[in-house]
Image (cartoon, grey):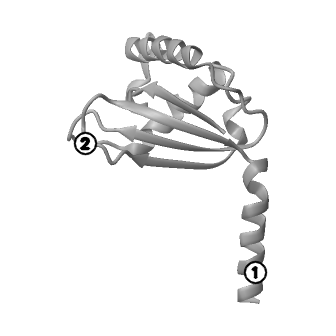
Amino acid sequence: MTVIRLPYPPSTNHLFGSHGGGRHRTRAYNAWIAEALWEAKRQNPPATDGKYTIIINARRPDTRRRDLGNLEKPISDLLVKAGLIRDDCDAQAIRLEWSLLPPGEPYVTVTITPWTDQAETHLAAAQRYLEKVA
């Protein structure tokens, strides 16, 4: 299992802009990528190879309404760029949650667990369910 703390990313709505017919990363997204890569390297977490599950726990920066789902894509893409996961298509389960801490310094805690550590538990639960409904 890998646990890493990253700066709070820009919303998916603020990752890309367009200029002259082309799509490009915004300054805010480029700045976040640079900061988050530095932070990831500083923590030196182990990489996860293959299928995995991920939990993203985000501390709110303020009390404004925010779409929690918009945080997943920049974080998953960063984990690939940092070499912590091979490909974000290997995610078998994604869980997003707001921190129970009050709004304050915004950040996210990311927990990556290799799927092999959980596959037997999931298969056993599925088997028990199928036996109940049969």
Q: Quarter-wise, where is residue 69 in the image?
A: top left
The residue positioned 74% from the left and 47% from the top of the image is 115
Which amino acid does the dot numbered 2 rest on?
A: Pro
Image quadrant where residue 60 sits: top left
Could you say whether the residue bearing mark 1 is in a helix, strand or loop?
Answer: helix
Q: Position of residue 54 (x, y in %)?
A: 60, 43
Task: Determine whether, in the image, residue 22 is placed left or right of residue 7.
Answer: right
Give the farthest residue toward the left.
63
Locate residue 78: give its quadrant.
Answer: top right
Per the image, the residue denoted by label 2 is 102
Label 2 sits on a secondary structure element that is: loop
In the rendered structure, the answer to whether residue 72 lies left or right of residue 10 reads right
**Rendered image: mark on residue 38:** none
Q: Where is residue 55 drawn, in percent x and y?
A: 54, 44
Tell me if mark 1 has few (under 14), some (14-19) or many (20+) residues whose alpha carbon lies within 10 angstroms of its own.
Answer: few
| Residue at image location 73% in from the left, 62% down from the top | 121
The residue that label 1 is drawn on is: 130
Query: Where 65 sits versus 35, above or below?
Result: below
Give me the C-alpha separation between circle 1 and circle 2: 41 Å
The number of numbered badges drawn on the structure is: 2
